Image (cartoon, helix red, strand yellow):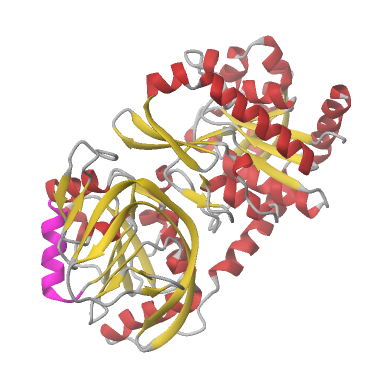
Amino acid sequence: MPSSQPIMFQGTHSDAGKSVIVTAFCRIFSQDGYKTAPFKSQNMALNSYITVDGKEIGRAQGVQAEAANIQATTDMNPILIKPNRENESQIVVHGKPFKNMEAGAYRRDFFDTGIQLIQQSLINLNKRYDRIVIEGAGSPAEVNLNDRELVNMRVARMANAPVVLIGDIEKGGVFASLVGTLQLLEKEDHNRVIGVIINKFRGDLSLLQPGLSWFEEYTGKKVLGVIPHLPNLNIDAEDSVILNQYTHKQNSEKEIDIAVIQYPKISNFTDLDPFTVEEDCHIRYVSSAKELKQPDLVILPGSKNTIEDLLFLKNSGLADKLESLRQKGNTFFFGICGGYQMLGSEVHDPLSIESPFVTSKGLQFVPLQTTITKEKTTTLSQGIVIFQNNRFEVKGYEIHMGITKFEGNIKPFIKKTTELDGCMSYNEKIIGTYFHGIFHNDPFRESYINHIREFKGLAPIYRRPSYVDIREEAYDRLADHVRHHVDLEYIETKMKEYQQAAT
C-alpha cells in the first residue's frame, strides 16, 4: 500500500496560529480531492471533542477533521492532557482516561508508552489517508524539553514529514523568533524545515518586504507566505488565551448582555460561540464580582475542577453577586456541565478525583447534588426540549465525571431516549444541562434568546443565522484565504519529494 504524504506545521511559540493553518490545509487538500486527516500526537487542552464512538480528543483535531470532511478518530490525537489542578493533569489515551499524573512523572514515566502510541496512530492513518496534516505544540526549540518531547521534531522524523515553521507577527519580533528557533534546531531538524509562514499580518506588505528578503538571504529558508489577519472567523478556538479577545471585539451596545463566568479551570467555552454571530448578543467573559454588573443572562460553562472553581466563585465574591442577581429576578442563568453541577446544593468528590476538597456547597439555585466518580461519561447525545411550550430536537455531547441527582421537585430539561438530563426552574429562568453544544442547535437558541428579549420588552428576532452553515462557510473562507497567500505549489513539491525519498 502506498504511503501517505505528510506535512507538519510547527510554531515559534504557542498561539502562533498552528491549529488554524492546519485547519486551512485540511480543507484545501480535501477540496483538491485528497483524503486528508489531521494529526496531533499530544495535545494539552480543556476544550474537547467527542468522536462518533464516544471517545475524547482535542477540540482542534475534531474541527480539523470537520474541515477535511471526515469523521474524527482517536488516532488523530492519541494523547490528550487535561490540567485539573496545580501541576497535575488527567492523561487521556485514545479517548479514555488513563490516569492523573504530575508533570515530572509524565515526562519520566510516560515517554516510552507515548512513543508507541504515536507510532501506531501514524501507521493507522498512513493506511487510510492520502495526506496527513500534522500539528506541533509550543516551540520545537524548547532545549530543556527536547530530549523527551512527544509532539514536535521527533514526530516529524517519525512521520518523515517536511516542516513549515509559523511565526506570529502580531506579537512582535517575528524575525527574531523565526531565526532564533531555526538556530536552536539540530542540523537534521533544521534541514527538515522547508520554509516559514508569517501569520496574522496587518498593514502594507511592501513595508515588510525588506525583512522578508533579508530573512531568506540570512537563513536560506524560503518565506512560503505572509497571511493577513482574517477577522470574524467563526471556527472553534481551543486555547483559553482566546477568551481575552471576546469582550473587546464585541459591540457592547447590543441589546442582550451575556456574562460568561471565566473561572480558572474553564472548559469547552466553545459552547458559547454561536452567540457571537447573533446581531443582538454581547458576550463578556468575567472573572470578578465588579465585572459582572447587571447582565440579562449569566452562563456558567464547563469546568475541569468543579469544586475548586466553586471556591473561586465564593472567594472572588462572584457567588454572592450571582445570588443577588437571582433574587432580583431580572437575570437568566444557564449552567453547562460543571456549571450545571455548580447550580446545585452540593458537589462531592469523596475520592479526591478532581480536588483535595471532598465537598463544597454549590450556589443552591436548584435542588440537586453531584458526586464526582471515577467513571467518565463521553458520548454524543440527543433528546427533546420543551421550552416555552415549544418542542425542540437537540443534539450535543457529554464529557463529565459526575452523577447528579435531584433532591426536590424540579422539571428535567432534556428528555433522552431512556433517561432525563438537566433541570429547568418552573419559570424557565434557571437551566442546567450536561449537554455541551446545546446552543449550536439553532431553533432552540433562537427561542431562548427571543424569550429573554420578550422578558425585556423587546420584539423577537426570527430567521436568525444558522451557526452550522456559518462554520462551514468559515472553513471555505479560511482555505481560500490561505491558498491565496501561500506558495502551495512549492509545499506540494516538497511533500512529494519527501514521499519519494521514503520509498
| Residue found farthest to the top | 187
Residue lying at 13% horizontally and 50% vertically, measured from the top left: 314
| Horizontal relation, residue 337 to residue 345: left or right | right
Using the rendered image of the protein, determine whether residue 295 is visible from the camera's viewpoint.
yes
Above or below 374: residue 255:
below
Camera sees residue 244: no
Q: What is the x, y in percent for residue 285?
A: 32, 55
Name the spot of residue 38 as percent of width and height, x first. Answer: 66, 42
**Where the C terminus falls, by quadrant?**
top right
Q: Position of residue 72 (x, y in %)?
A: 63, 50
Of helix, strand and loop, which mostly describes the magenta segment?
helix
Residue 20 at x, y percent in the picture: 59, 45
On whether residue 249 falls in the magenta region, the answer is: no
Give me the residue at 37% from left, 54% from top: 248
Q: Is residue 322 magenta?
A: yes
The picture quadrant where one finds residue 398 is bottom left
- Whether residue 278 sits left or right of residue 233 in the image: it is left
Locate residue 476: give its quadrant: bottom right
Instruction: Look at the picture and state if 74 lies above or below 397.
Output: above
In the image as oriented, which residue stretches furthest toward the front?
418
314 is higher (above) or lower (below) than 296: above
Q: Quadrant of residue 357?
A: top left
Which region is colored magenta? 317-330
